[in-house]
């Protein structure tokens, strides 16, 4: 029994010596091993990101981003393709009974492209509305981020309830927070940040999304980045107000003065040329020259209104 106890003691001592030796080697080569481990992780991330980019074409990724950004409960791109294909086939079969093959294909194409056009229109309206919310979002996030001692998760949880009048950014920030909470994969974090920035479509949204991703992924402080975004947003707001003020006179001239001048021209023509209203309408509509001039005037008037609308209602960005 004494021999058994002696053997057990020798085994324990040898085990302790080997353990201490391995620990010493571990501490000695810790930097090399940690560097090797990080290289393996980076290579794995690179292969995964490269695989995702290779699998997804530009068109497929565009459809994915439109669906994720414009729908409250987005469907998968495969389901969207399926519905579009079913709509194309249905419309083509129905149209083929009335029209020829080429006409039926054109009608089916127009019908199947309508859902995408509606989603795209909704996205652009959402972007225009969401761009106006940037200053408040950046200001509130910076304030809560400082209160929470640079904890981006807690800051987002406090910011979202405060954005009741910023519906677009509130919804997108909530979705971003849910994904960041439920995953630790940097690839998924980057994809979620890209969806948020794409849904707004401005430079400040790209900077804000990237800052939030960096804070969640690496834990770096983004206070200075948020301050810079806020300063540039305020400068952009001032520039937008100045642009509206400068273009307000042009808008009034186009909307009110142009129709008034046309009516005055008609009245002067009737008075000085001694024409009856019937003769004027006949010359204006019944002749090719008069009708061409009328259509050209209406077209240019609509173009002027469209240009003013685009200039005066741009997205708030820098």
Image (cartoon, rainbow, N blue to C red):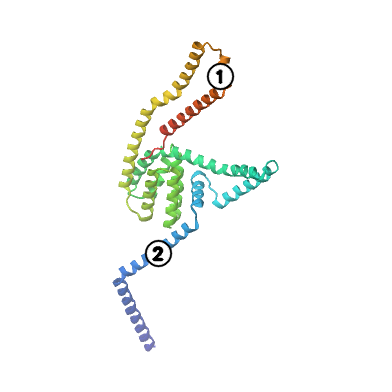
Q: Observer-nearest residue: 215 or 150?
A: 215
Question: The C terminus appears in which quarter of the rendering?
Answer: top left
In the displayed structure, would residue 223 be above or below residue 308?
A: below
Mark drawn on residue 54: none
Q: Which residue is mark 2?
A: 43
- Above or below, 68 against 290 in this view is below
Q: Is residue 105 left or right of residue 316?
A: right
Q: Residue furthest left?
A: 28
Q: Residue furthest right?
A: 97
Dot 1 lies on which element? helix
Q: Residue at x 38, y 53 (%)?
A: 216
Circle 2: element type: helix
Q: Is residue 169 visible?
A: yes
* Picture coordinates of residue 302, whole percent (x, y): 49, 29
Q: Earlier in the sequence, mark 1 or mark 2?
A: 2
Q: Give above or below for 78 relative to 106.
A: below
Residue at left offset 57%, top offset 50%: 81
| Location of residue 229 in the rendering, given as x and y in whole percent from the top left corner | 34, 43
Q: Which mark is residue 283?
A: 1
């Amino acid at each position: 029994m004494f021999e058994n106890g002696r053997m057990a003691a020798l085994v324990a001592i040898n085990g302790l010596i080997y353990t201490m030796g391995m620990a010493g080697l571990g501490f000695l080569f810790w930097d090399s091993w940690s560097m090797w481990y990080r290289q393996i992780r980076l290579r794995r991330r690179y292969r995964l990101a490269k695989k995702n980019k290779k699998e997804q074409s530009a068109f497929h990724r565009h459809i994915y981003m439109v669906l994720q950004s414009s729908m409250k409960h987005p469907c998968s791109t495969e389901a969207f393709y399926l519905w579009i294909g079913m709509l194309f086939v249905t419309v083509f079969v129905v149209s083929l009974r009335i029209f020829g093959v080429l006409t039926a294909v054109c009608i089916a194409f127009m019908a199947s492209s309508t859902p995408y056009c509606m989603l795209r229109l909704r996205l652009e309206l959402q972007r225009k509305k969401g761009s106006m919310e940037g200053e408040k979002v950046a200001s509130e996030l910076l304030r809560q981020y400082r209160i929470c001692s640079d904890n981006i998760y807690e800051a987002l949880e406090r910011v979202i309830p405060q954005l009741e009048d910023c519906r677009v950014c509130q919804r997108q920030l909530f979705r971003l927070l849910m994904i960041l909470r439920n995953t630790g994969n940097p690839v998924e974090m980057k994809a979620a940040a890209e969806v948020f920035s794409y849904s707004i479509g401005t430079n400040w949204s790209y900077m804000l999304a990237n800052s939030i991703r960096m804070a969640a992924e690496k834990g770096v402080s983004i206070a200075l980045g948020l301050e810079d975004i806020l300063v540039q947003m305020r400068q952009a707001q001032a520039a937008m107000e100045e642009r509206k003020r400068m273009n307000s006179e042009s808008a009034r001239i186009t909307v009110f003065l142009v129709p008034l001048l046309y009516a005055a021209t008609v009245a002067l023509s009737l008075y000085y040329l001694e024409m009856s209203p019937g003769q004027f309408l006949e010359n204006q509509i019944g002749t090719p020259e008069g009708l061409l001039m009328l259509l050209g005037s209406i077209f240019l008037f609509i173009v002027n209104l469209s240009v003013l609308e685009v200039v005066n209602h741009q997205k708030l960005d820098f």
